[in-house]
Amino acid sequence: MNKWGIIATWKMAVDGVAIGADILKNKGKCQDAVEKAIMEVENDPLYTSVGYGGLPNENCEVELDAAFMDGKTLSMGAVAGIKDYKNPVSIARKLSEDRFNIFLVGDGAEAYAHKNGFIRQNMLTERAKKTWETRMDEITQKNLSPYDGHDTVCMISLDSEKDMAVATSTSGLFMKKRGRVGDSPIPGSGFYVDNEVGGAAATGLGEDIMKGCLSYETVQRMRNGVSPMKAAQSAVEDFSEQLRKRRGVAGAISIVAMNNKGEWGIGTNVEFSFVVSTDEKELKSYLATPIFNEDKTIKEIKIEEM
Ligand code: GLY
């Protein structure tokens, strides 16, 4: 039997991964698997960090970031700060077919989406608006820091023809500044995939993930013969340590990785859930919990089925 597999960040991805796994099981392509799986998450209004229902910026506007990459051709496409379009991941995939202008932002991305027939939709739900209003009150009354929530959905998949793809989608930091872009649409930071090795994708504080180009870093470690688990864990641990040493603090960082044999791994410096389905093991959600040494370095990561 040919190998296939799909791994995703966060338990919210479980229904999407089931759709992606079904495509892969039936000898479908990895590109379709990651796109359709992420669309499922984007379309669910209950997920407050992705697509419809995503939490807004400080001006109460839902600005979305998404990316798509094909491991065979290294084609990639991305959008950032796009408003009022239903499935940013599909727009990113479409952009990846182009030779030039593959990463579009704001109204440029919206004009492209309009021209190419993508569906317009107000992405701000009543629920997200209420959360914004409550947080505005809290910030004003309690002098709280506004930033929170950066649970990007990322998917990496391998299909039975040994092709690989990766995609990401997020509404980014809740209460972010208008125009703020995180790691998720940035090649090498939020995602990377190469058929010759494997892929990796990140979730967490974009401002810190970007500083280490952590998805590319993880793929490079796999290229040097390291397993996806070791590559992702060591990339997160080494860089968190650098951030602590040089800046005093490391934000939340989690990485999922899969190589071109369908072996998978994760690295994280916070409690983090993820979902995997492969030809060898049915779909499962897992919880990863880092156990710390006294000096804040990570002793081990406990991974349990949820
Ligand atoms: N990791 C998502 C973001 O920071 O926007």
Image (tube, rainbow, N blue to C red):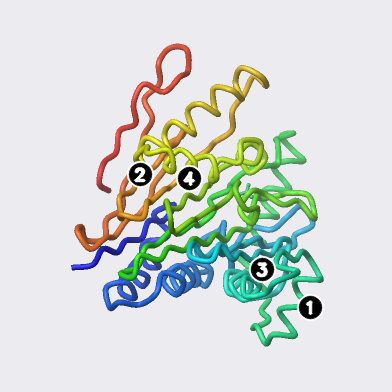
Which of the two labelled residues, at mark 3 and mark 4, occupies the earlier sequence position? 3
Disc 2 from disc 3: Cα separation: 34 Å
Q: Position of residue 5 (x, y in %)?
A: 32, 61
Seen in the picture, residue 162 relative to 8 is either above or below; the reply is below
Which of the two labelled residues, at mark 4 and mark 2, occupies the earlier sequence position? 4
Quadrant of the rendered image containing residue 48: bottom right
Q: Which three-letter amino acid code belongs to the residue tagged 1?
A: Ala
**Disc ID at residue 111:** 1
Instruction: Give the SS element for disc 3.
Output: loop
Q: Position of residue 184 (x, y in %)?
A: 61, 53
Disc 3 from disc 1: Cα separation: 19 Å
Viewer-nearest of labels 1 and 2? 2
Q: Which three-letter amino acid code belongs to the residue tagged 2?
A: Gly
Q: Which three-letter amino acid code belongs to the residue tagged 4?
A: Val
Viewer-nearest of labels 3 and 4? 4
Q: Is residue 253 left or right of residue 58?
A: left
- The residue indicated by pointer 2 is 265
- The residue indicated by pointer 4 is 219
Question: Is disc 1 surrounded by few (<14), some (14 to 19) or many (20+) residues within 10 Å?
Answer: few
- The residue indicated by pointer 3 is 124
Q: Are marks 3 and 1 in contact (CB under 8 Å)?
A: no
